[in-house]
Image (spheres, rainbow, N blue to C red):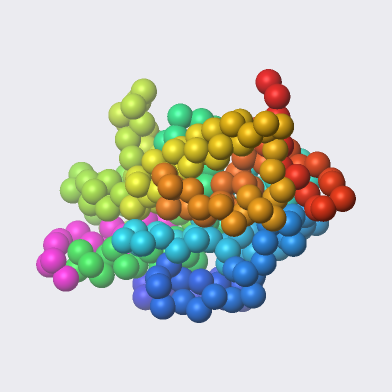
Amino acid sequence: MENSNPSTSRKRQRPGPEPGPEPGPESDLNEAQLQSVEENFNFSDTLVALRMMRAQFPRIEKVSIPPFILRSQLYSSVKDRTQVDRELESLRREGVLCTFKLNTGQDDHAIMFLDDYFSQIERISKRLEAQKLEGLCVFEWFKEHVIHSKLDPSIGHDELRSLLSLGGKVKEEHISLLINAGLLTRQLIDPNMYWFAIPNIGSVLKGLSQGRKELMSFLNRRKYKEMAMAALEKKRLRLSPLDMRFHLRDLLGSGHLKTVEAPTGLLVKVVKD
């Protein structure tokens, strides 16, 4: 086992994310980030779509969070939803991706490249190491024995302890460390069940919900409840740290919006109830 980087031995066997933006202001804009939704609206391959959306993930000030993609965004870009679900399952089993159930009150799932998630765990571990906390070995156990073994977005307390014990003697303090780090959240209906989680995502999820409402309200106030995609992409949302491109793909994939061909390009229209 290579504790310094548990995913190293598998990288030659799996197609990870292509070089993309790290979540920080020092990254340069690359070609993928500059392309519009209209220029990259349809993909024939789920992994290609994931890589493009990862590269286009917006920089979020004051929040350290790796790029993630919503399942609804994939549905907007790869027309065959059965293909998306099938390819996502395959990529999860190959150790390329991990998925998370988001606490938005809707059936939202986030997708993240496993290498990005592991990098975030390592940053958290190093930060806590500087605070001289004990039991930090649990982060390696979590990466090696839990994430690689568990494909579901949730896990029970007993199974979590069992998998962690493959790395060493497990104490409740170890699980508390994972919870406090934001890697696990207790389920409200059953405190013995946990959701796998993305650390630092709370404020982003609030912006996701508010941005959805803001964009839908904006379009509903227009006379024909529509707008040219090229013009809409240039608008800025006041209530969300996520950009218009992110929200457009989300609402198109969830069926709240649709696109219509027009002589001047694609129109974005509200879907009537």
Residue 163 appears in the figure: no
Q: Is residue 59 left or right of residue 216?
A: left
The residue positioned 45% from the left and 63% from the top of the image is: 59
Percent x, y of residue 80: 79, 44
* In the image, farthest residue toward the left: 132
The stretch in magenta equals 130-145
Which residue of the protein is positioned furthest toward the right in this rendering? 263
Report x, y in % for residue 134.
15, 61
Which residue occupies 74% across, 62% down?
39
| Residue 85: percent from left, percent from top | 69, 44
Q: Is residue 171 above or below residue 31?
A: above
Q: Is residue 231 above or below residue 209?
A: below
Q: Main secondary structure of the magenta part?
A: helix
Task: Locate the N terminus by quadrant.
Answer: bottom left
Residue 203, magenta (yes or no):
no
Quadrant containing the C terminus in the rendered view = top right
Q: Specify whether 21 is left or right of 142.
A: right
Q: Residue at x 33, y 52 (%)?
A: 200
Tell which of 26 and 71 is nearer to you.
Answer: 26
Q: Would you say 130 lies left or right of 265 here?
A: left
Is residue 48 visible in the rendered image? The answer is yes
Residue 126 sits above or below residue 53 on the image: below
Q: Nearer the viewer, residue 219 or 185?
A: 219
Where in the figure is residue 197, as x and y percent of width and height? 40, 47
* Front position in the image: 213 or 231: 231
**Residue 143 lies within the magenta run:** yes
- Is 126 displayed left or right of 153 in the figure? left
